[in-house]
Image (cartoon, grey):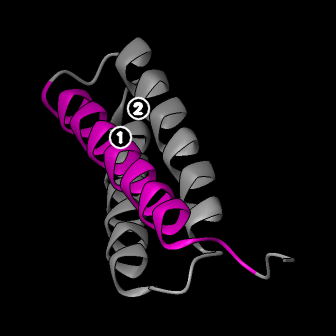
Amino acid sequence: MPRYGPTSLQSSNSISQAQDAAESAHSAVTKAQSHPAEQLIEEAYNSLDTAENALQQALKVPNQEPVERVKEQLQEDRANLQNIASDEPQ
């Protein structure tokens, strides 16, 4: 029988991965806010990129409500990180 879309387990796994990656990114951004060193800011950007990649996979699943929450959190964290990066002395 052909498969037409992700199974329920695959869907929840994609969402869980996106949520976990977003939590990790949020922690990295919070750490960069507390200690705005160049290395921590770079790590936060890398963590956000990883979370956004996980989000792209989660966008393929039918249940989009938790995915939208992850997307909103990542947008907020990216904006916060950009504020930190622009405030850092060059």
Q: Residue at x 19, y 28 (%)?
A: 31
Residue 3 percent across, percent down from the top left: 79, 75
Q: Secondary structure at mark 2?
A: helix
Left or right of 24? Residue 6 is right
Query: Which label is found at residue 5?
Result: none
Magenta part of the chain: 5-34
Residue 35 percent across, percent down from the top left: 18, 21
Q: Quadrant of residue 43?
A: top left
**Quick check: 40 above or below 45?**
above
Name the residue carrying label 1: 25
27 is within the stretch colored magenta: yes
17 is within the stretch colored magenta: yes
Question: What quarter of the picture does the N terminus occupy?
Answer: bottom right
**Quick check: 70 above or below 52?**
below
Whether residue 4 is visible, yes or no, is: yes
Residue 8 percent across, percent down from the top left: 49, 72
Q: Secondary structure at mark 1?
A: helix
Query: Which label is found at residue 44?
Result: 2
User: For the residue marked with disc 1, what is the amino acid?
Assistant: Ala
Q: Nearer the viewer, residue 85 or 67?
A: 67
Q: Residue furthest left?
A: 34
Is disc 2 surrounded by few (<14), some (14 to 19) or many (20+) residues within 10 Å?
Answer: many
Q: Residue at x 63, y 50 (%)?
A: 53
Q: Residue at x 37, y 55 (%)?
A: 16
Q: Residue at x 33, y 45 (%)?
A: 20
The overriding secondary structure of the stretch rendered in magenta is helix
Left or right of 85? Residue 1 is right
User: For the residue marked with disc 2, what is the amino acid?
Assistant: Ala
CB within 8 Å, label 2 to label 1: yes
Q: How many marks?
A: 2
Residue 23 percent across, percent down from the top left: 26, 46
